[in-house]
Image: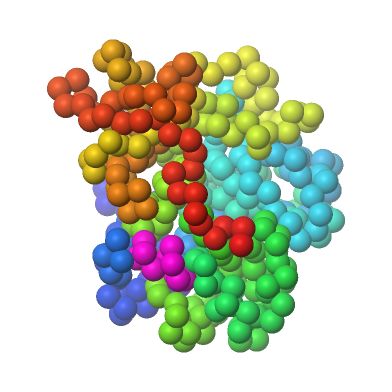
Amino acid sequence: METSLNNTPLADVHVALGAKMVGFGGWNMPLQYESILAEWEYNRKTVSLFDCSHMGEFMIKGDAVACGLDRIVVQTIVDMPVNTCRYGAMLNENGGVIDDLIVYRKGPEDWMVVVNAANIEKDAAHFRAHLNANARFEDASFKTAKLDLQGPRSRDVLKVLVPGIEQLTYYAFGQFQIAGTPCLISRTGYTGELGYEIYCPWEKCKEIWQNILDNDTVKPTGLGVRDVLRVEMCYSLYGHELDETISPLEAGLDKFIDGNKDFIGRKAVSARPPQRTIGCFTSTSRKSPRAGNKIFDAAGNDIGVVTSGTFSPALQAGIGIGFMSRHSKEAGGQVFFGDEKNKAAAIVAKRPFYKNGSLKA
């Protein structure tokens, strides 16, 4: 049975601007406006605007520990300063990743949690099941739109519209206004470049989108190049590097786990030392790996599987992320990707592939 797709507030705007539209995570989204290569170059060198209104936003009121929020997420949140945010995840009882997410602390007992678009419904059910009577929970995903302004020129563009935005540090946020509309703006993103994520009322999204695009420096950009940008940075994508069968240790999320607190799935994670972990590799040619390709060692042994792959304009080579047996991850070692009949050579690399970005400029 065909399932209808959700539309962001900008669906008709994307069509009018000539975007190629595709289904993604249950949403009708712009894949690209120009070629992927042109959009990649513009984002890496200038500034791009993405519609990310498909992402989910949950609003939670309550003391982090007393209401159960602290136990739901794996990262440290009780010591977060107000107006900062932290990346992490939430797990099932078996230690698998239900979703990766970012927690925003808006006040001492005022939180926003941003989750992946395809997981909004199941994530909301998980929060409702594990928050207690001390919490107030609202799924504001269809009230809250999200625009991502990313690229080395993003600060220059935004400070004209938002005085004081240049004071924001990495993974900090504040309450601002764009054209008179209140917005939460954080200095975060998914591209490896300097950038900002703008959360605004759903009904004001078109107006804010146009206000930003009125600056001729900015170009609208699709999800196709966003995937290339995130693979170059070795950022995980739910459904590829993360899912409910994958432990956070396998996925390389160790540094985001607070080992000094209890959280759902902790016992299972501790009892399941990973036999494989995430790694990355660079093709010795322009041939690109694809999700599902096998990874082989130099002797031809099957040692893992590709979870994400693409052609990297930065390296002019194919690049891949995948799960590999632990002993196979030493940088500089040779591996192969493909299948038993067709294998392409690659070299194990250090994360990230792209190292020259403006992320923390």
Residue situated furthest front in the rendering: 332
Depth check: 311 or 236 in front?
311
Q: In which quarter of the image is residue 295?
A: top left
Q: Please, is residue 106 above or below residue 234 in the view? A: below
Q: Which residue is drawn at 28% across and 69% down?
A: 34
Residue 170 visible in the displayed image: yes
Q: Residue at x 26, y 15 (%)?
A: 300
Q: Residue at x 49, y 54 (%)?
A: 356
Depth check: 40 or 172 in front?
40
Depth check: 191 or 23 in front?
191
Is residue 76 left or right of 108 when viewed as pictured? left
Horizontal and vertical percent for residue 341?
A: 15, 22
Whether the magenta-drawn stretch holds residue 186 is answered as no
Q: Quadrant of residue 110?
A: bottom right
Q: How many marks?
A: 0
Q: Please, which colouring scheme is shown?
A: rainbow
Residue 134 visible in the displayed image: no
Is residue 85 left or right of 11 when viewed as pictured? right
Q: Residue at x 46, y 86 (%)?
A: 214
Horizontal and vertical percent for residue 127?
A: 65, 43
Q: Please, is residue 117 above or below residue 240 in the view? A: below
Q: Give the range drawn in magenta.
A: 39-49
Which image quarter holds the C terminus? bottom right
Horizontal and vertical percent for residue 113?
A: 65, 52
Horizontal and vertical percent for residue 286?
A: 24, 43
Q: Please, is residue 261 above or below residue 309 in the view? A: above
Q: Is the magenta stretch mostly helix, strand or loop?
A: helix
Q: Quadrant of residue 133?
A: top right
